[in-house]
Image (spheres, rainbow, N blue to C red):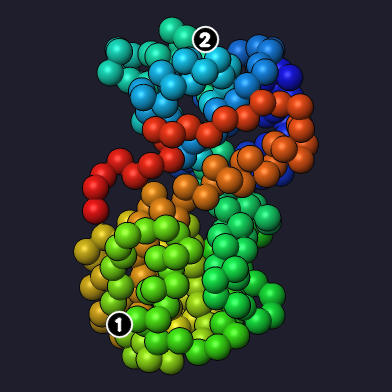
Amino acid sequence: MTIQEIYHILDGYAPFSLQESYDKSGLLVGDPAQDVKKVMLTLDITTPVVKEAAACGAGLILAHHPVIWDPLRSISPEHPVWHLVQNQISAICSHTCLDIANGGLNDFVGEMLAEVLPLTGEMAPLAELSGGRTLGRTAELAETLNAEQLARHLKTVFGCRSLRYAKGANAENIRKIAWCTGSGGDLIPDAIAAGADVLITGDCKHSVWMEAQNRGFTLFDCGHFETEVPSVILFERILNEKAPDLLLTVSEAGTIPPYLV
């Protein structure tokens, strides 16, 4: 398939036009007319990931996080883009558009939660964005849990060895949960407005913890990496359905935490 054909598959599932104004989703490196037989899936495009792709013959890397974020004033061997160009490997990144899309990453994580935490009723949007777009999801648990019980279940869902959480007023009687993959701590007001007892997200700054404390709200930080690495499984699902003959490989370097816990 050509890069352009794969781009259109992804655009049809999670339109790149949905991305936030600050985002850099899309075809960031490469020729749309390039033919590829193998695609590497990853959360991030790092130099080790590019070397891994080159070694296995992948002509395209599909990632959740953009490999180009700030304007590049120079390109040296310390930057993954150098290695992409050197190895003639293209890069497509589907970031906030995948977070926002119906059936996107937040819905997929909802499926993961439902496997461990039985939910009742339909998932609903957490936050309203401009243009009718939404971010995050809410749902009710089939059974009430306390914060310690929920923490144990979340470690199972996201495969994290540890997580951080702050107990709020409803920490002993959690029924409605809200979640946003990645860094969603700024959605605490939206979670409260939605009637959620907790917000499950990652990458919470000190100021976010202080806001949770001031509001008496229960907050879970399960890690930016841990809440977004499921994007790789979602990419695999999308491409297997729309392009079953395309060879897919999952990056090892791009799907293990870049830190020790």
131 horizontally vs 46: left or right: right
Per the image, the residue denoted by label 1 is 167
184 horizontally vs 235: left or right: left
Quarter of the rendering containing residue 80: top left
Crowding at dot 1, Cα within 10 Å, few <14 / some 14-19 / many 20+, comes out as some
Which is more toward the observer, 168 or 253? 253
Which is more toward the observer, 178 or 257? 257
- Residue 256 position within the rendered picture, expressed as x and y whole percent measured from the top left: 38, 42
Which is more toward the observer, 129 or 65? 65
- Residue 149 position within the rendered picture, expressed as x and y whole percent measured from the top left: 40, 81
Looking at marks 2 and 1 on the same chain, the residue that comes earlier in the sequence is marked by 2
255 horizontally vs 38: left or right: left
Residue 223 position (above or below residue 138): above
Quarter of the rendering containing residue 241: top right
Residue 150 position (above or below residue 128): below
Residue 24 position (above or below residue 180): above
Which is more toward the observer, 6 or 125? 6
* Badge 2 amino acid: Gln
Residue at (43% x, 40% y) in the render: 255
Per the image, the residue denoted by label 2 is 88
- Residue 54 position within the rendered picture, expressed as x and y whole percent measured from the top left: 48, 15
